[in-house]
Each structure stands twice: as C-alpha cells, then as structure tokens.
Image (tube, rainbow, N blue to C red):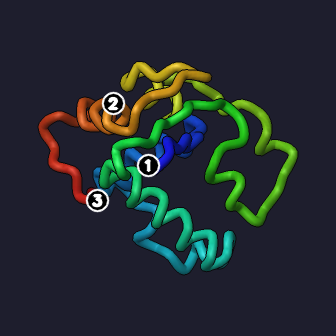
Amino acid sequence: MAERIITLRPHHIDRFVSYYYKFQNMFDNPHALEARYGSEMVKQLKTLYGFVASGGTGEEYILVRSGLDSICSMCPIKRDACSEPDSLSVWNGSGKVIEEMDLRDGFLYSISEFLEKVRQLYSGRNPVNK
C-alpha cells in the first residue's frame, strides 16, 4: 500500500484526543452531529478517527496544518472562516494540546509517532477508542 498523508488541523487534533480517551466524546451525541453535518460526514469522521486510533496500516503520516485539512474536505458546510488558521492560544484546547504534544504546523509525523504523542498526554490513562 502506498503511503498516505492525513492532514489534521489543531482543533481536529484536539477533538481526536478527546475521542481517543473518550473525554466529552463528540460521538456520544451523534444526533446533534448528524443534524449539523449529515450522517455521511459523521460516518466518515468516525471511520477516520477509528483508523488513526488503530494505527492505520502503519504507512500513514499525519500532516499538521493550521487551515483546511482532511476533515474539512469531508464537511458539507463550507465557510470562509474554515480556511483561517486555528487559534493556538494555550488557553483553548487546541493550543494546549498542540503545545503538550510538541506538534509543529507544516510537519509530518508518522502515524505511530503521532499516536505516541497522544499517549504521552495522559500516560496514566488507558485509551478507550483504539
């Protein structure tokens, strides 16, 4: 299988971490998500997060990008604000997670390296969704 690059912006990484550890998991209330984004997008997002959480095939890379990403390309709601960079203030979830994981915008991380950084965030806690 050829290498695959999955692009994730900071606030989607923050949501992935919540999914991985089941903190305020966005899929706990799928009806609200489906009402906003549609059932197909929710299904694709859950599949993508599950794939990343499982370690994929091991040949994937995560590209951190503050702007449009792989999830944005699935989303039926297109807004101009989506292409703007995420706020990386350490006072919001995205900024704190990016800082703690030591991720850099524009850098590629192997899927295993990315997951190791996720695991190091809460080293004493077992992931729920993997």
Residue drawn at the location 38% of the way across and 38% of the way down: 111
Q: Nearer the viewer, residue 100 or 1?
A: 1
Residue drawn at the location 45% of the way across and 42% of the way down: 60
* Front disc: 3 or 2: 2
Relative placement, left or right, of 88 versus 36 is left
Marks 1 and 2, how far apart at CA: 15 Å
Identify the image quadrant of the C terminus. Answer: bottom left
In the structure shown, which secondary structural element does the residue marked by tag 2 occupy? helix
In the structure shown, which secondary structural element does the residue marked by tag 1 occupy? helix
- For label 1, the residue is 16
Q: How many marks?
A: 3
Instruction: Estimate how packed mark 1 is, as few (under 14), some (14 to 19) or many (20 or more) residues with alpha carbons within 10 Å.
Output: many
On screen, residue 82 above or below 30: above
Give whichever of discs 3 and 2 has the lower sequence position.
2
Marks 3 and 2, how far apart at CA: 17 Å
On screen, residue 8 above or below 47: above
In the structure shown, which secondary structural element does the residue marked by tag 3 occupy? loop
- For label 3, the residue is 129
- For label 2, the residue is 113
Residue drawn at the location 84% of the way across and 52% of the way down: 79
Q: Which three-letter amino acid code belongs to the residue tagged 1?
A: Phe
